[in-house]
Image: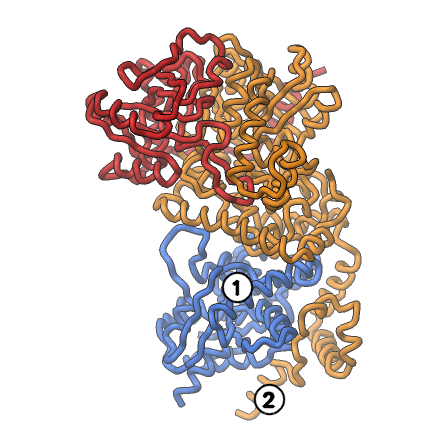
Chain colours: A red, B blue, C orange
Amino acid sequence: MPSSKEQILQSLRSNRPAPAELPSLEREWTTYADRRAKFIEVLEFVGGQTIVARDPADLNDQLGRLPQFTSAQKIASLVPGFAEKNVDVNAIDSPHGFADIDVAILPGEFAVAENAAVWVSDEHVPLRVLYFLCQHLVLVLPASQILDHMPAAYERIATSNQGESQFRTPRFGTFISGPSKTADIEQSLVIGAHGPRSLVVCFVESL
Amino acid sequence: MRVGLFIPCYIDQFYPQVGIATVDVLEHFGVEIDFPTAQTCCGQPLANAGLHTETKPLAERFLTIFGEYDYVVSPSGSCVAMVRHHYEQILGHSPNLDAVAHKTFELCEFLTDVLKIEHLSGAFPHRVGLHQACHGLRELRMASDTELVGPAFNKPRQLLASLRGIELTELARPDECCGFGGLFAVTEEAVSCMMGRDRVLDHERAGTEVLTSTDMSCLMHLDGLIRREKKPIRVKHIAEIISAALASQN
Amino acid sequence: MQSIKDHPTAAAEFIANRDRVRWHDTAVWFARTKRDRAAHGVPEWETLRELASKIKLHTMSRLDEYLEQFEANATRLGAQVHWARDSAEHNAIVASIIQRHGATRVVKSKSMLTEECGLNPHLEQLGIEVTDTDLGEWIVQLLGQHPSHIVTPAIHIRKEEVGQLFHERLGTEAGATDPNYLAEAARQHLRAKFLAAEIGITGVNFAIAETGGFVVCTNEGNADLGVSLPKVHIACMGIEKIIPRAADLGVYLRLLARSATGQPITTYSSHFHGPRPGGELHIVLVDNKRSELLGSGDFRRSLNCIRCGACFNTCPVYRRSGGHSYGVTVGGPIGSIINAAREPHEHKTLPFACSLCGSCSDVCPVKIDLHQQLFISRRQLANFGLVPKSKQIGLKLAATIFARPWLYRIAGRLARLALRITPKAITYGRFNVWGRQRELPPPPRQTFRELYASRRAKK
């Protein structure tokens, strides 16, 4: 008795349509003269906030004035030199241990101007849940790391794991664009659904 | 050039003035028309009901009757769309079908694309609302729709806009379907009438006095609702407007 | 959930509630206008659609190979891949994974596939608690209803109803309707569910053959919370969700959210490659008649579908009849095609719940020729003898008349005469469906051909 896999594959083979070519993705996609400006505009549109800082001191200064910081009890940071942190992330070994984090300051790898997305992965955090469980999220990345569009993002992902694809080895990565949100109650937009209630993206020029 | 005139069955029977207006417009531009009397119906109602086998003989008749002309012109976007886009699904591909399909035009696109008319001289000093009939819009591509991203163009509107004194009204939903849909108008009567009423309301709010379209079937449905509700909007096929405007010069 | 009502009846009932249908149409049209703004902001939009369509068509032409490639790569990364021929097998596989772990608390993010398979009732009857964590899905779950839209499942529900529901089930204030207040209550309640969950189930938006990974897109963050707290992640996908290359996501992720909600991208587009350290990742590949659809020349393009919901939002019929009127898991234009193709007898009114306006085809990001497929669906139904007899008889009579010009002329004259002389009470009596809300056209004394002939005679 052939396995389900075999039966499915057999059914697919016997129903195969005529060959159709796989198109190339080489195109002149829209680019931006000022990628940072485009990113800032789109992030605001999706309910997020951008901070541009010259250096760590400047960033600490700007972050310290945000309401989510002034009211925070527990701050976890995995970005060296940034923000007062009072939680030792490495001492927490279970994802549930992060349930009471108010603000998480985490590294981002690169940003995408067209849709204000920031690529983050579990290469930089011990537990991926950190990106989602905190009440407020801050992502920090070098100001130079802004790409134009998604095709550029995938080109970057394809080569940034020591010349190879980030997807060659087990990996969790996600594009984060803005704070979590829902419009499921009568199409009214509510910022802050299950994930973080706010997102601040920090571009640091000295990094 | 010899043009075979295709007058849809329901225009022949219920809106003959639209056929006469079509003749007037074409003759105004010096087109030699012939109306082959053997014609009846393009088969659209049957095809839309899924009865493709029963549609086949009607489609074949159409090709036979109209095959000899240089062009076939009809004041009905949906019938022309039937010939150009759906006859292949009924009859299969054939060079004969190709030949006839390529020379079959709705009236407005015949004026703009074949006769190369960009402006019409004549007056029609009224507030006119253009209902963009779906088959003409999304199958014949007589105008750009709000869905696709690309350059804007609109053949019927362009012709109307060139008339003196005309004011074209702006709709909230410029190309939503009126809800006629053929037998849909009867089998899904509740939805059909709500869709039609919403179109009429859009036109009322836009200040339309004369509601027009390239398809009398849409107008028949909208007019039915307008007259039942005794609204003061007049309904005229675009051929009637163009014909009246051209005649106003005399 | 199969509704016993046909679409026209269900639609008429929906429309009878004037306030609700007016609101539903406005709310869903709003989603369409947001899509328009997003799409028109991308100059290369039509190029993206063309590529998205071609990539899918290519993939379908080698689907078996790509699935095998996907399995090999996913397995290499440490995932466990399962194959399910149909919904029953899918449910059994998911249940057995859960039971093997002795788990009873499961959270699930939005997956139309699990709806299609009826997973929740199956698990519940085994004593497993499944919480749908997408807010809209959770609301319909609490109400014991089915989603009415594949992206915004609770779009048919007013905020007063949500307020009432939450008051009863969560203890929120009576009469509260502020979406922020209600969403906050849901956040707190569901947060506890995430923290207590033993297993997380997600759907799959795209599965990448070349890498063995897959992508899950959400705005709420519920999928990610659901699978980064518990140790076990079960991902359920229809086999048509495969794409060949990671780079192809540079096309699909630019189209999906813009088409669905008008956003440039969903808040989270999570790429899962292998299980997390110390965790388990199960991927369930489901056929459930997709391979058969592949064999249909007429309908195979419906497998391109990326479940964005744009066709629902633009469909003038869906907006005025509501998702439940279709009586199937996935309704709207795409659902009408797929369900009528799979089970023609059950769903014979669906391809006719359509005015053939063609708007769906023009918004579809993967260029499925939806309105053409709906047109062809009708031929298939007619071939199966599923067109209602009354319609058939009338139309076949019409065909006979149209084939004979002399008969056509006589029939026309009689019809117009009848309209002129028959009293209104009879003409607009109960058999005249057209006449319920519309006047019939006024019958002229002469036809066009008579007028034209006499005009030519004068010349």
Marks 1/2: CA–CA distance: 32 Å
Circle 1 is placed at which residue position?
B133
Residue C292 position within the rendered picture, expressed as x and y whole percent measured from the top left: 65, 33
Side (left or right) of A155 relative to B52: left
Q: Residues within 10 Å of mark 2 (few under 14, many from 20)?
A: few
Circle 1: element type:
loop
Residue C298 position within the rendered picture, expressed as x and y whole percent measured from the top left: 60, 43
Residue C226 position within the rendered picture, expressed as x and y whole percent measured from the top left: 54, 22
Quadrant of residue B42 in the image?
bottom right
Circle 2: element type:
helix
> Looking at the image, which is closer to me, A16 or C77?
C77
The amino acid type, in three-letter code, at marker 2 is Ser
Point out the residue furthest to the bottom here: C458
| Mark seen at residue A144 | none
Q: Residue at x 80, y 76 (%)?
A: C426
> Looking at the image, which is closer to me, A73 or C116?
A73
Circle 2 is placed at which residue position?
C454
Of badges 1 and 2, nearer the viewer stands 1
Q: Residues within 10 Å of mark 1 (few under 14, many from 20)?
A: many
Q: Is residue C121 visible?
A: yes
Side (left or right) of C88 relative to C215: right
The chain carrying label 1 is: B
> Looking at the image, which is closer to me, B230 or C249?
B230
Quadrant of residue B94 in the image?
bottom right
Q: Residue at x 38, y 26 (%)?
A: A71
Residue B185 position within the rendered picture, expressed as x and y whole percent measured from the top left: 66, 62
The amino acid type, in three-letter code, at marker 1 is Ala
The chain carrying label 2 is: C
Give the vertical position of B14 relative to C155 (above or below): below
Q: Residue at x 61, y 45 (%)?
A: C160
